[in-house]
Amino acid sequence: MDPQAASAARYRQTENWISHLTLLLGAVAAGLVGLRYGWRWGAGITIGAALAWLNFRWLKQGLDALTQAIAAQGMRSKGDVPVAAYFKALFRYALIALIVYVIFKYLNVPVLSMILGLCALGAATLVVSVHEILRPQE
């Protein structure tokens, strides 16, 4: 296997780890918080972690589309980037904020719990980064 393909496979594996750990850490935190502070707080953590996972997927899809367009542009005069990639890249934070507002307003889930759930992505990224540092693969 050539080094470039091996590197790409390793990056995909790291992205998958981050994606899975975001949901796992969110679920564990939601369970613990839900037992201690009630189901609304647990639901908020769950919703926040799910939104963080969705944000990560949208970011990945947007960057993949952009990378493919740049690679295609190198071969021809113009690369085509799907409109959905622009939409997801530009409006993903607005969509997440809108979802959080609607859930807060109509389901009475604490906003702070959803914000803490959004931190699951950062926690997952930190765990995977420390793992990569402590166990490097060449």
Image (cartoon, rainbow, N blue to C red):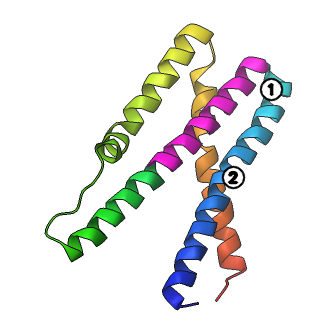
Q: Which stretch did the figure color magenta?
A: 39-58
**Secondary structure found at label 2:** helix
Percent x, y for residue 72? 27, 69
Please tell me whether mark 2 or mark 1 is closer to you in this view: 2
Q: Name the residue beneath numbered marker 2.
A: 20
The image quadrant that residue 131 belongs to is bottom right
Say which quarter of the image contains residue 132.
bottom right
Residue most extreme to the top: 106
Quadrant position of the N terminus in the picture: bottom right
Q: Which mark is residue 124?
A: none
Residue found 60% across the figure and 29% down from its top:
114
> Residue at point 79% right, 22% down?
37
Asked if residue 87 lies left or right of residue 45, the reply is: left
**Numbered circles on residues, count:** 2
Can residue 96 be found in the magenta stretch?
no
Against 102, residue 87 (above or below) is below
Circle 1 packing at 10 Å, graded few (<14), some (14-19), many (20+), is: some
* Position in image of residue 64 (x %, y %): 41, 60
Instruction: Give the answer, above or below, for where 106 lies relative to 48.
Output: above
Please name the residue shown 76% across and 39% down the image. Answer: 27
> What amino acid is at disc 2?
His
Which residue carries the number 1 mark? 34
Up/down of 88 relative to 13, above or below: above
60 vs 36, nearest the viewer: 60
The quarter of the rendered structure image containing the C terminus is bottom right
CA separation, marks 2 and 1? 21 Å
Residue 39's place in the image compared with 77, above or below, is above
Place of residue 58 in the rendered image (x, y in percent of width and height, measured from the top left):
46, 46
Q: Position of residue 125 (x, y in %)?
A: 61, 58
Of residues 134 and 13, the one nearer the viewer is 13
